[in-house]
Image (tube, grey):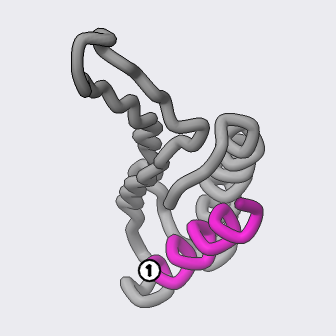
Amino acid sequence: MTITAAEYEPARAELDRQLSAVADAVTDAGGIIGHIKASASVTSVEMFSVTGEDGVAAKKSPELMIAIHLAAIVFAVDQEFAEQAVRAALERVKEIL
């Protein structure tokens, strides 16, 4: 997914809320949380080129790319339930972008 720098902070805040929502869903269903964590890799692209004697030209993309990896180690809930909670959380993050 590609986003602008201005869009990253709201996505970060929503990811925080959604991790809590997954935890709440698991505990509300009687489950036990081992841990639930996410990592967000945010990268930008910068291109460099030389087309002659003018030297190196550099252009930086105004957009950022974000990849979110989420792990939920939970117990005493159905695997399908846990997967649905995680997928719903990631969809909610995606919706605000």
Q: Report the front residue among 74 and 7.
A: 7
Q: Report the front residue among 34 and 63.
A: 63
* Residue at image point 57% right, 67% down: 90
Q: Is residue 49 left or right of residue 37?
A: left
* Residue at image point 48% right, 62% down: 32
Q: Is residue 59 magenta?
A: no
Q: Is residue 95 magenta?
A: yes
Which residue, as the protein is rendered here, is positioned at the far front? 53
Q: Is residue 87 left or right of residue 9?
A: left
Residue 30 in percent (x, y) is at 58, 74
Residue 85 in percent (x, y) is at 56, 76
Query: Up-down: is 51 above or below 31?
Result: above
Number of numbered markers = 1
Q: Is residue 69 left or right of residue 66?
A: left
Quarter of the picture containing the C terminus is: bottom right
Query: Up-down: is 53 above or below 9?
Result: above
Q: Which region of the structure is painted magenta? A: 82-97
Q: Residues within 10 Å of mark 1 (few under 14, many from 20)?
A: few
Query: Up-down: is 68 above or below 40?
Result: below
Res 92 → quadrant: bottom right
Please tell me whether the stretch drawn in magenta is mainly helix, strand or loop: helix
* Residue at image point 73% right, 51% down: 14
Dot 1 falls on a residue whose secondary structure is helix
Q: Report the front residue among 54 and 79.
A: 54
Residue 18 in percent (x, y) is at 67, 58
* Residue at image point 40% right, 21% down: 58
Q: Which residue is mark 1?
A: 83
Residue 81 in percent (x, y) is at 49, 86
Q: Is residue 67 left or right of residue 18?
A: left
Q: Report the front residue among 45 and 12.
A: 45
Query: Up-down: is 61 above or below 19?
Result: above
Q: Amino acid at mark 1?
A: Glu
